[in-house]
Image: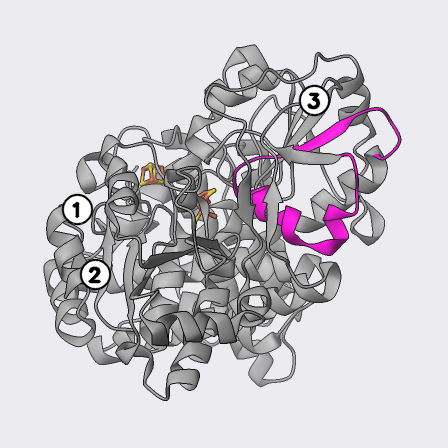
């Protein structure tokens, strides 16, 4: 196997025996085969679309398939087998794209051994040239990010044919020999399509659940049994809350589900009692202590310990062998009655050490822009000297302590703008407020980085300057492919001088890094002191 799609990749270069994330070689092979088939399906469908004979369902199918291959989403061979079979069926129902079709358009897997053998020749290392491999990988991982966000929007009934057409165009391009400038242009188009998909999801969330409001979330535990819901899918939360009301069971959010408390449609449920635990990589300890069932709606799923595996459920694109999966029925409805029944037999959650203080969330664009006059006034008076965008992901490596130390060392006249699970490194530090404005403004999940862009654009307008002239610095933490897309989206908007850490991506070759440094001023993070001097005090 060879996988280098996430920040925790082995030695910073690639997982070759087993994933640091727990992905086994066999699953890596199934994922590589599925991505390959999606490339062939894209080639055929794009050609068919030109003749008016395309399959309009192929785009969402590919988005779902790619989402399943993201880091920490799905470890279940049975689910990948189903995806592979469906990809072949969908591809073969389309007319041929021409006389000399690429192998991805014609290969038919003949079972397990064939898939494992094929994966050796169609994965990342099948591109020999290091820079071409780097550009194709950057594009592929950005496309995986698009897929994840598109799937979330589609669950809420929002789709956009142009986004999934680009998804297929991008995938198809990775099996063509293209000049380097064309590949760079596709990477940038991936970023601008990323902005579109983030906006689509933002609209979908607000239309379905209302505008997030700045909200304090409890982290204490109650006496009733609880269900813990983690991941990013708000529709799953909606169905769970509706089905569990008046059952004597409480619902707690975990990880990236925390911002749900800011939406009026969720805060109205009295049995949505608080947030339990922190970011994804603490789950082994936290799920054990929770005592009740845990529902995984999306990444980041860590291979579970036996002590709580019997209380784990997956839904959506997540999966793990031996863990019950709750699939959607007609109209997308899901039946969570098994989870609720199990919860009733469980003890209430154990309070986690250090928990108990409220966490503020819901600082999305509408809520922050409602305070625009106060914010602009505080900047003009010099009460706020700098905004630091510290959005992105958390991860388990010790080096991420940098982000807590950086937040603690920030001068008191700075405000952190955040989104994604990176916030757990500093959202309980009690950094206080400036004139009533929280010093940690949590816009929400990683997809809500879009909110930060809207806020930055509104500030630029208010001050009559360009986005790079604002008193805003970017100190972004990445982990998986949604964060790759968010980075490309920021670059496509012309944001310069982003600091990226805790490590630069293993898939960025020296020559591609050179482009990122020269054109965009991208930098790796270094030490708190040096980065503070550069980002805040400069
Ligand atoms: Fe985190 Fe995981 Fe939201 Fe990611 S839970 S790391 S960018 O999947 O999705 O921020
Ligand atoms: Fe390794 Fe990350 Fe790939 Fe998992 S997702 S196999 S940790 S590079």
Tag 1: Cα neighbours inside 10 Å, few (<14), some, or many (≥20)? some
Circle 2 residue: 536
Q: Quadrant of the C terminus?
A: bottom left
Circle 3 residue: 222
Label 3 secondary element:
loop
Residues tagged 3 and 2 counted as in contact (Cβ below 8 A): no
- The total of numbered circles placed on residues is 3
Q: Nearer the viewer, mark 2 or mark 1?
A: 2
Q: In percent of the image, x 50 and y 66: which residue is there?
A: 451
Circle 1 residue: 528
Closer-to-camera residue (423/87): 423
Give residue 505's position: percent from left, percent from top: 24, 51
Q: In percent of the image, x 48 and y 26: which residue is there?
A: 283
Look at the picture and state if 140 lies above or below 49.
above
Q: In which quarter of the image is ligand 2?
A: top left
Look at the picture and state if 255 lies above or below 102.
above
Q: In percent of the image, x 20 and y 51: which residue is there?
A: 504
Label 1 secondary element:
helix
Give residue 102's position: percent from left, percent from top: 39, 65
Q: In percent of the image, x 40 and y 31: which residue is there?
A: 23
Closer-to-camera residue (332/26): 332
Give residue 225's position: percent from left, percent from top: 74, 19
Specify start and end residues of the magenta stretch as a single range: 245-271
Q: Is residue 7 left or right of residue 483?
A: left
Label 2 secondary element:
helix
């Amino acid at each position: 196997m060879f996988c280098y799609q996430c920040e925790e990749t082995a030695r910073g270069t690639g997982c070759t025996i087993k994933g640091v994330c727990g992905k086994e070689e066999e699953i890596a092979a199934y994922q590589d085969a599925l991505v390959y088939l999606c490339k062939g399906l894209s080639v055929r469908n794009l050609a068919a679309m030109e003749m008016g004979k395309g399959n309009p369902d192929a785009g969402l199918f590919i988005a779902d398939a790619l989402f399943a291959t993201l880091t920490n989403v799905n470890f279940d061979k049975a689910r990948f087998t189903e995806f592979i079979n469906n990809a072949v069926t969908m591809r073969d129902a389309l007319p041929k794209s021409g006389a000399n079709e690429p192998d991805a358009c014609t290969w038919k897997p003949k079972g397990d051994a064939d898939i494992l053998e094929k994966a050796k020749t169609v994965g990342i290392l099948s591109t020999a040239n290091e820079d071409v491999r780097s550009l194709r990988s950057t594009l592929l991982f950005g496309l995986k990010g698009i897929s994840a966000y598109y799937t979330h929007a589609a669950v809420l009934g929002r789709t956009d044919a142009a986004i999934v057409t680009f998804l297929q165009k991008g995938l198809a391009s990775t099996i063509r020999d293209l000049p380097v400038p064309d590949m760079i242009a596709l990477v940038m188009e991936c970023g601008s399509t990323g902005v579109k998909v983030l906006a689509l999801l933002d609209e979908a969330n607000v239309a379905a659940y209302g505008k997030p409001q700045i909200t304090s979330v409890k982290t204490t535990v109650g006496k009733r049994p609880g269900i813990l819901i983690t991941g990013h899918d708000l529709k799953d939360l909606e169905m769970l809350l509706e089905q569990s009301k008046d059952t004597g069971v409480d619902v707690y959010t975990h990880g990236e589900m925390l911002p749900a408390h800011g939406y009026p449609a969720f805060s109205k449920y009295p049995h949505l009692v608080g947030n339990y635990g922190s970011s994804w990589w603490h789950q082994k300890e936290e799920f054990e202590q929770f005592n009740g069932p845990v529902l995984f709606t999306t990444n980041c799923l860590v291979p579970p310990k036996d002590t709580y595996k019997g209380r784990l459920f997956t839904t959506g694109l997540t999966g793990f062998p031996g863990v019950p999966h709750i699939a959607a029925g007609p109209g997308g409805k899901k039946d969570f009655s098994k989870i609720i029944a199990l919860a009733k037999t469980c003890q209430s959650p154990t309070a986690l050490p250090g928990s108990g203080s409220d966490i503020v969330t819901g600082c999305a664009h509408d809520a922050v822009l409602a305070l625009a006059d106060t914010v602009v006034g505080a900047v003009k008076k010099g009460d706020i000297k700098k905004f630091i965008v510290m959005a992105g992901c958390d991860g388990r490596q010790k080096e991420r302590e940098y982000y807590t130390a950086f937040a603690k060392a920030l001068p008191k006249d700075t405000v952190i703008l955040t989104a994604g699970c990176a916030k757990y490194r500093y959202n309980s530090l009690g950094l206080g407020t400036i004139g009533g404005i929280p010093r940690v403004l949590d816009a929400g999940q990683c997809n809500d980085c879009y909110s930060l862009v809207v806020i930055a654009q509104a500030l630029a307008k208010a001050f009559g300057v360009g986005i790079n002239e604002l008193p805003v610095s970017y100190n972004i933490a990445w982990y998986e492919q949604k964060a790759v897309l968010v980075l490309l989206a920021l670059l496509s908007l012309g944001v310069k001088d982003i600091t990226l850490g805790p490590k630069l991506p293993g898939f960025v070759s020296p020559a591609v890094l050179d482009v990122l440094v020269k054109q965009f001023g991208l930098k790796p993070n270094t030490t708190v002191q040096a980065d503070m001097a550069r980002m805040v005090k400069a």
